Image (cartoon, grey):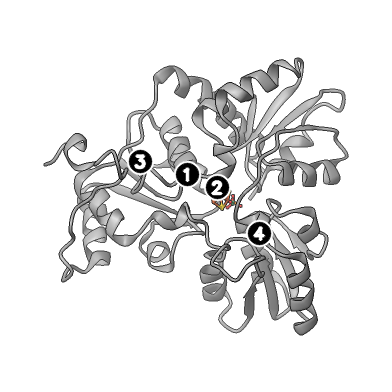
Amino acid sequence: MFSEMQVIDPRYGYVDEVVDPSLDLMEEILRFKQDKNVLLLAHYYQEPAIQDVADYVGDSLGLSRQAADTEAEIILFAGVHFMAETAKILNPSKTVLLPDLNAGCSLADACPADAFARFKEKHPDHVVISYINCSAETKAQSDIICTSSNAEHIVRQIDEDQPIIFAPDRNLGAYLIKQTGRDMVLWDGVCIVHETFSEQKLVRLKMRHPGALVLAHPECEESILRHADYIGSTSGIRAFAVNSPEQSFIVATEEGILYQMQKDCPGKTFIPAPPESGCLCSQCPHMRLNTLEKIYLCLKHEAPEITMSEETRIKALRPIERMLEMSVAVV
Ligand code: 13P
Ligand code: SF4
């Protein structure tokens, strides 16, 4: 067996090895999962083949709950770095693998721990609620973590007279202020995928599909959310479409979610919301770094592995545990 040092080229952040093209990668991954007692977690923003080979596909809250509950020896996270870090924080004795260490997140990148510490100093006495899309070091400076599924539920549990810092997503923060009436201090971060949707193109699309409901993720800007018939996490969007009597939907989030929605409701029509330019901007460039080949190599070599200092892990664990405790009622 190769050691991590041998197989991970630091210039790349993933196992750089030629894969035999005759291999059935799905079969190989299933075999590794069984032989090595692996839990393969995938976010909805992964390509369809990865969603099909995963043990669980879900949103950030569902994935965290799965990571917290597993008996597996290895967790492979087909998602981005902050998600795999969260799994490691919850499972210090398990091996947590991320197929490509470059799979970051614009929100996490927008909130470096040292700048966040200075920001907090300017707002003493504030409770810090951080969106799960942040680094372990930023989580370690937070009081409570939240996801888009439970953010409103958690904010509503904070005493009315308690001032709040919300980081790092200013769009989710602004949405929460509107929903709860709480006056929160916001960190100025955005998701590069959700900020690209075009209001003008969305309005034109709605005119072409007058019966379609607009389902939007709260990471979108207000100019998009104001046209939404439903606003929620990826799991919320999926559940809304399943339960709705309507037949067509415009979906303003990363388009990977459309795969499960179409599987749930083969007879319904799902239309991705249009980004500003004609590019693939509604695919997350970080999420899409994961491929079946990288997952296969990652399981073969058990690398790259997520590591962090025990001091950071312990500090980051408490706000994640508080999130899980405060959102038991959120499905
Ligand atoms: P959820 O799946 O928790 O709604 O989060 C969306 C997202 O952008 C994850 O990076
Ligand atoms: Fe981060 Fe946005 Fe990609 Fe989610 S979709 S991982 S929030 S950059």
Distance CA(mark 4)–CA(mark 2): 21 Å
* The residue at label 1 has a CB less than 8 Å from ligand 2: yes
Mark 2 Cα within 10 Å, few/some/many (few <14, many 20+)?
Answer: many
Amino acid on which disc 4 is placed: Thr
Amino acid on which disc 3 is placed: Glu
Quickly name the residue at label 3. Answer: 71
* The residue at label 2 has a CB less than 8 Å from ligand 1: yes
Q: Residue furthest left?
A: 1
Circles 3, 1 touching at the beta carbon (< 8 Å)? no
Q: Nearer the viewer, mark 2 or mark 3?
A: 2
Q: Secondary structure at mark 4?
A: helix
Report the front residue among 120 and 154: 120
Q: Along the horizontal axis of the image, is 301 left or right of 234?
A: left
In terms of image quadrants, where is residue 228?
bottom right
Quickly name the residue at label 1. Answer: 104
Quickly name the residue at label 4. Answer: 196
Amino acid on which disc 2 is placed: Ser
Mark 1 Cα within 10 Å, few/some/many (few <14, many 20+)?
Answer: many
| Res 71 seen here | yes
Q: Nearer the viewer, mark 4 or mark 3?
A: 4
Q: Along the horizontal axis of the image, is 39 left or right of 314?
A: left
